[in-house]
Amino acid sequence: MSTSEKKPVDLFEKCWTFTRADEIKAAGYYPYFRPIEENEGPEVQIEGRHMVMAGSNNYLGLTSDPRVKQAAIKAVEKYGTGCSGSRYLTGTLDLHIQLEEKLAYFFHKEACLLYSTGYQTAQGIIPTLVQKGEYIISDRDNHACIVAGNLMAKGAFAEFVRFKHNDMKDLERLLSSLPIEKPKLIASDGVFSTTGTIADLPNLVALAKKFNARVMIDDAHATGVVGKGGRGTASHFGLEKEVDMTMGTFSKTFASLGGFVVGDKPVINYLKHTAPALIFSASPTPASVAAALAALDILEKEPERIKRLIANADKMRKGFNDMGFKVIDGQTGIVPVIIGDDLNTFVFWRALFDAGVFVNAFISPGVPQGMQMLRTSYMATHEDRHLNKILETFGSIGKKLGVIN
């Protein structure tokens, strides 16, 4: 058949033939897009039912803190609901400057720049800094926002390579194969969002120095969780001066929406004036910035919240292990329970949901085959009654489904 005789394919054909989600819905196991009707942190209402929340990234429990809510309300009353422009033009408020200055001070860096979302932050850093003929080197398990930034850089003719997850030997192999004189950026999650494991930052930094590379760490799941006073992965390892940039989000510890990057003043100034993701995006809203400011203030004044968060997560890790579940060990607020099969993960999730416990179901291809999991995550505001209910419910269902003995 000639080119002119080939049957045309409609762009939407892939949409019409996508049935996986509908099949799971029909089976009654669909775990996604469940609307939350009320949210008090460790307890929520979903579809009219009271539930214990064990799937949120609200690590310090600040989304329902009266001080954070009041800060957002006051900001709306003073500034309105939006900024009606980009940071570059009419969208910069004194609130933005205050938060940038406080975050730079908090992370012991010279300067900070806010972005409208955490996801957008990586796209406002990587393709802006890594240009034609330069290299972005990325952990294979990095968050999707870093992957998107990498692909944007690659589309502008930068070189994009990946190393095996947290494998420093593979990173060294890759770096040694690249031209030493070429500029390079190594990007890695600090705390990996799926497993809760921490990057091998000491060895990563040593390799960066050896092979002429800069380092950017995504501390979305590390800020307020690890490091001195919750200052993240670099602080956790005592490497704040050696990590060139730390990016993060307000949607977790900071109980809001938005993203940020901290680093040396010339680097932040360059991003500020050249990053399309900043220049052509609407500014973070007054309420979002004010909420993040209030959350940062609470984090600094109440470091005991971090201790409670880690104590809660440690209790759950031990509890799951003692019952015989396969758990990925860690030191953060994320505690993944491995189920190992797509359908069994959905069935287990539904049984938990029906019993009043909400967790997150991760299946392939989002995780490798055999690593399908129920990812649980904890808050400083979880009480023993919440944690005990989660453990008891997991144990009962685990035995019923044959996941544990």
Image (cartoon, helix red, strand yellow):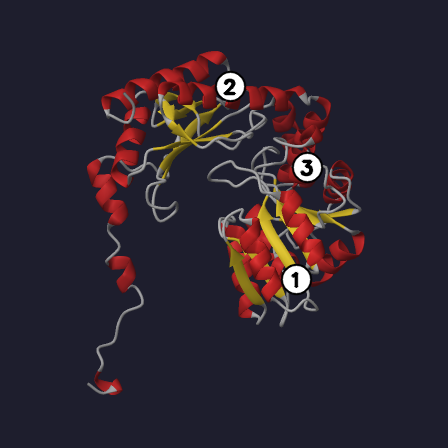
Q: Residues within 10 Å of mark 3 (few under 14, many from 20)?
A: some
Between circles 2 and 3, the one closer to the viewer is 3
Q: Position of residue 371 (x, y in %)?
A: 36, 40
The type of residue carrying mark 1 is Lys
Q: Is residue 156 left or right of residue 387?
A: right
Location of residue 334 with respect to 319 vertically, above or below: below
Q: Nearer the viewer, residue 309 or 252?
A: 309
Mark 1 and mark 3 in contact? Answer it, CB < 8 Å.
Answer: no
Q: SS of the residue at dot 3?
A: loop
Q: Quadrant of residue 267?
A: bottom right
Q: Is residue 299 left or right of residue 18?
A: right
Q: Quadrant of residue 355?
A: top left
Q: Is residue 245 visible?
A: yes
Check disc 3 and report the residue beneath it.
Answer: 237
Residue drawn at the location 22% of the way across and 81% of the way down: 6
Between circles 1 and 2, the one closer to the viewer is 1
Q: Residues within 10 Å of mark 1 (few under 14, many from 20)?
A: many
Check disc 1 and report the residue beneath it.
Answer: 184
* Location of the N terminus (image quadrant): bottom left
Q: Is residue 392 left or right of residue 120?
A: left
C-alpha span from label 1 to label 2 = 42 Å
Check disc 2 and report the residue beneath it.
Answer: 382
